[in-house]
Image (cartoon, rainbow, N blue to C red):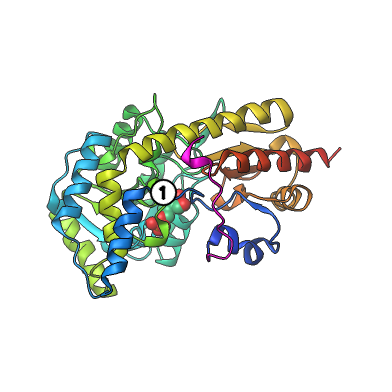
Amino acid sequence: MSRFDEVVERRGTNAVKWDGLKTVFGKEDVLPMWVADMDFKAPDAVIQAVKKEAAHGIYGYTLVPDSTREAIIDWMYDRHDWTIKKEWLLFNHGVVPSIGAVIEALTEPGDAIIVQPPVYNPFFDMIEKNDRTLVHSELVLQHHRYEMNFEDIEAKIVSENAKMFVLCSPHNPGGRVWTKDELTQLAAICEKHEVYIVSDEIHSDLTRAPHKHIPIGLFSANAVTLIAPSKTFNLAGLQASALITPDKELRTKIQKVFARQGAFTLNQMGIAAMEAAYRYGHEWLDEAIDYIQENVRLVKEYIEKEIPELTVMEPEGSYLVWIDCRKLGLSDKELLALFLDEGGVALGNGAKYGPGGDGFMRINVACPRSLVADGLKRMKKAVQSLT
Ligand SMILES: Cc1ncc(COP(=O)(O)O)c(C=O)c1O
């Protein structure tokens, strides 16, 4: 029995994934496999750190101490072979708000910014809501695996005069962990054309061997890397994340945006949790990765055998599984409704991730295996209802 087998009741805790079902899907009595958070309890060290803060009883303005920076520096070196310096770090409450802040800091209204759909949809919002021009360089599907289209990227940088590239590394929802060759090629193109890279590496800690996450900051001086313990240790509700860039000028520009927003520190619980997670979370994470790997294997084997109409794209990193449902010949809305109404399972709908996402569904397998098994049965029931 693994600690991750425990089914923890989350209904009634204001969990978006569970308590948001009615608002988002119009139904409460379905199994949620959509939002990207885990149904696992955080590591004990994190729970203890948060309890200690809570027990103190004074919740005033809080600094991010050097000990938190040191925990991040050690983590990045131990897990990703990247030596970073204390002064390269900035903090913000979330990765998505940081994308918005970096866009505001380093580009001008109207500037073109490239993304690679199908991709995490808040990227689109951050670009468009900041009045920049969204440019797609669609990923190419080769043998059920996404590849970057470097010719297209360079052509669009030139034709659109792009100023920024928002990279999802590892990729959500496609699950790709970009290789060193891919990242060096991308970094070289962006450097050649003086395009900033914003690299969202929030899923990086969940990469599974033999794949290896490589921070693009290793090759690119123009990159701002965004990390967080939120996906890794299931701390999204504590809202703590970091930005890494060696370039002082870029940091100063980003800090100006934070100052304009009146954002100058983090949540006290978030700081304590982040430090404890990065300092003491290695063993918990190794176990979580193995557990998720088994869940992915279960999904793959079950779908191959029981629902052959669907094709699983095995993720190289992250706990999100991208499922090709195009053989069913249904529209996006029909697919969502099929799984929801006929199966009783709420999935992430592929079309919202932009071009290339139509006909795909995303499932989150960071939950006890019994829930994954239940979700798979529901998916089978839904597909069988078509015949
Ligand atoms: C690629 C990616 N970036 C960012 C986020 C969210 O980050 P945050 O909650 O820190 O804004 C998610 C959550 O699913 C994600 O998948």
- Residue 369: % across, % down: 58, 38
Quadrant housing residue 297: top right
Q: Residue pushed farthest right?
A: 387
Count of all numbered marks drawn on residues in the image: 1
39 or 22, which is in the foreground? Answer: 39
Label 1 secondary element = helix
Question: Does any portion of residue 319 appear in the rendered image?
Answer: no
Magenta highlight: main SS: loop
Q: Mark 1 sits on what residue?
A: 231
Q: Which residues are magenta?
A: 1-13
* Residue 329 rendering spot, x and y as whole percentages: 75, 40
Which class describes the residues within 10 Å of circle 1: few (<14), some (14-19), or many (20+)? some
Residue occupying the point 27% across, 44% down: 280
- Which residue is at the front of the view, 44 or 90? 44
Q: Quadrant of the C terminus?
A: top right
Which residue is painted at 31% across and 32% down in the image?
185
**194 lies left or right of 110:** left
Residue drawn 27% across the image and 60% down it: 271
- Where residue 167 appears, x then y in whole percent? 38, 45
Q: Does the beta carbon of the residue at mark 1 sit less than 8 Å from ligand 1?
A: yes
Q: Is residue 207 above or below residue 59?
A: above
Q: Nearer the viewer, residue 119 or 39?
A: 39
Establish if 86 lies above or below 255. above
247 left or right of 100 in image = left
Say which residue appears at 47% left-offset and 44% top-offset: 172
Magenta-colored stretch includes residue 9: yes
Residue 15, x across and y down, in percent: 53, 62
- Mark 1 residue type: Lys
User: Does the rendering let one see residue 43?
Assistant: yes
Q: Is residue 160 magenta?
A: no
